[in-house]
Image (cartoon, rainbow, N blue to C red):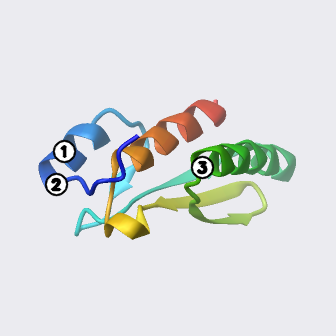
Amino acid sequence: MSREKLDSTAVAEMLATLDGWSAAKDSGSISRQFQFRNFSEAFAFMTRAAMLAEKLDHHPEWSNVYKTVDVTLSTHDAGGLTELDFKMAALMNKFAR
């Protein structure tokens, strides 16, 4: 999986394939808020995402308050978004179903 920074055109194209995610104005990160029925479901989602993050060696910026999980993805080493961010976002969407 490429860790090369994507240009704004590639970011827009890849973002169009993801439900619920939005790009920062500078196209340097993408973010989404996930809502669950309760804290246990939110925590289970975070646990699955944490296992994925370790496997991919790519860790999100996130916060959790009760049943809400806010996530921001960016590849800091690349100075912006890479294919890895979009892979992680797509899998997080799948986990949230």
Amino acid type at circle 3 is: Phe
Callout 1 crowding tier (Cα within 10 Å): few <14, some 14–19, many ≥20: some
Name the residue tied to disc 1.
10
Name the residue tied to disc 2.
7
Q: Quadrant of residue 66?
A: bottom right
Contact? badges 1 and 2 (CB < 8 Å): yes
Reply above or below: 37 against 73: above
Q: Of discs 3 and 2, which sits in the foreground? A: 2
- Residue 34: numbered disc: 3
Left or right of 46 in this view: 7: left
Amino acid type at circle 1 is: Ala
- Residue 93: numbered disc: none
Amino acid type at circle 2 is: Asp
Left or right of 58 in this view: 69: right
x 30%, y 43%: residue: 15
The quarter of the image holding the N terminus is: top left
